Amino acid sequence: MNTAVQTADRQLIETDIEQYLRAHENKSLLRFITCGSVDDGKSTLIGRMLYEAKALLDDQLSALEADSKRVGTQGDGLDFALLVDGLSAEREQGITIDVAYRFFSTDKRKFIVADTPGHEQYTRNMITGASTADLAVILIDARKGVLTQTRRHSYLVSLVGIKHVVLAVNKLDLVGYDEHVFNEIDREYRAFVERLDGSIERVTSIPLAALRGDNIAEASANTPWYRGPNLLEFLEEVQISTSSKNSPFRMPAQWVNRPNLDFRGFSGRILGGSVRPGDAVRVLPSGRTSTVARIVGLDGDRAEAIGSESVTLTLADEIDISRGDVICSAQDPAGLADQFEATIAWLDETPMLPGRSYLVKIGASTVGGSISKPKYVVEVNTLDHLVAKTLNVNEVGVCTLTLDRAVAFDAYADNRDMGSFIVIDRLTNHTIAAGTIHFALRRSQNIHWQALEVDKAARARLNGHKPCVLWFTGLSGSGKSTIANLVERKLHALGVRSYLLDGDNVRHGLNKDLGFTAADRIENIRRIGEVAKLMVDAGLVVLTAFISPFRSERKLARGMVGDGEFVEIFVDTPLAVVEQRDPKGLYKKARRGELKNFTGIDSPYEAPESPELTVQTQSIAAEDAAERIVAFLRANGMLAHA
């Protein structure tokens, strides 16, 4: 009898667990962020929500009690901020630095909340948290009202496409739960949101005292004048519209799946729409079309897959698809372009340099790209459009983004995943900006490469030698032009067709409009790189003698020509030596402050890390250096017929 009862009890428990798990699995998921200014109480609010939602286990409560006594700021009370402020620096300073993600659940819904920092210097972390959120809880300290950081975060929230905002007027207990204070903050904030052109569709204002629990999980007796929902009630009930299934199908290929010789599929996460076997698809950028043969998930073949699901597709036809290619609806394919108007939020301490070559990651593709001078920068307090030459840290502006090849895209307003990108520094691999695409520029779609029958290889055969770029770099006065001139003279004597692009000579014509600021130096080298590329295509050996102080731009120039066609020659002469030579008197002028942005004095020179050749002119004569360079070319087969 006892055994039968135990078995029945165990079965009942197992049934209850299965029912609970099924109910939990079917709950909707809401992703939201908390943001605002420093000390508005974001971490305390999240901690209190976790507490009120019964999302803390006994050992977590015990640890919170111990930590509150040891490092907390609430006396004998619980310091709820410690639940999400995990870094020691955060606990010491009482601030949020990194983004802290917490999962919790109520009877009605599942939640993932991102606690984002309030300091202006950590704006990049706030954007990271907002990029995947459906809703934003923007906190305001009732004592301080709407601040610059409140406006900045609200503007950034609107940029990333968040339509719903909870205005959490916190610390209302410190102003005596004054209804007038709450109403004035609500009025001022809504007036600001109205200027965002409807990008934030709904604002719900809730009076809070997060530390005390007022209006977190139930109506507070301290705010009898407030008739709206409490915070958790609102988050459980708010409806976030999603049209992902009804949007056109998009899936970037993240992996070519070949477990055996009989299976070839393309794995990725669906970024929009839905797909069924038999659907016609187009692959971009190639433009090839096919139909879906199978949809394979973790549990085997499926009849349909929808947005946000990760699946493997097989196609009816053998099509060359690589990582980063986008499989999309054949009837409504994504756009394909290499120039865009985009809104860019600059996140790096080093200002954006127009024309500099950066890496741009859009979807699963990483390509080279550059950013133009901003059309305008947005002043976050007034939303005015200001004239600017660059973007500084935490500034937001509208610019032209130019990529080195066409990529598949949708406007950010239509598809957040297909229309967003990050910018990466080529040398440090740091993420330095994030952006959203407005639209492709028409010129990028109307200009096409013309196919030519006489190509570089044909010209090289006629010339009798390989084309290449000899890129001389070094400080002013190091001897670049002298050595380059000697090398060209020797090549000419060998019958090699060549051309020398000298830094000073080019600035008399092609680049006469450029100065010597960092941005102008970058554009100077970009233009020279493009000219050198054309000359290599013409079958010439082109010599360039430029300071070219930045590694990034030399790397850009190298990438413009084929493998083995770029020879970087570092004319390595110490600053003390070139200052002593000073053939043009430029160093003396720079030391007197008469020449600004002079390389080596008040503008940096980044020495090559792995050049093909290094010439130290303090220990070798220019003639001998030239002989050594020609010998290098001959040894590497570049002068095979000369």
Image (cartoon, rainbow, N blue to C red):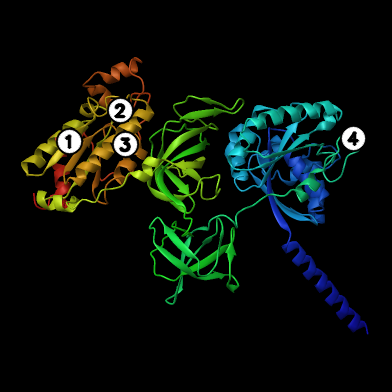
Residue that numbered label 2 is attached to: 575
Q: In this rendering, is residue 440 above or below 605?
A: below
Q: Which mark is residue 410?
A: none
Q: In which quadrant of the rendered view does residue 404 lie?
A: top left
Circles 2 and 3, Cβ within 8 Å, touching? The answer is no
Residue 222, disc: 4
The CA distance from mark 4 to mark 1 is 81 Å
Type of the residue with mark 4: Asn
Badge 3 element = helix
In this orientation, does residue 72 appear? Answer: yes
Q: Earlier in the sequence, mark 1 or mark 3?
A: 1
Could you say where residue 331 lies in the image, as x and y percent from the top left? 47, 58
Q: Nearer the viewer, mark 2 or mark 3?
A: 3
Mark 1 secondary-structure assignment: strand
Q: Earlier in the sequence, mark 4 or mark 1?
A: 4
Q: Which residue is mark 1?
A: 500
Q: Give the distance between the C-alpha atoms of the residues marked 1 and 2, in whole angstroms.
A: 25 Å
Mark 4 to mark 3 CA distance (whole Å) = 65 Å
Residue 1 picture location, percent across and down: 93, 85
Q: Are marks 4 and 3 in contact (CB under 8 Å)?
A: no
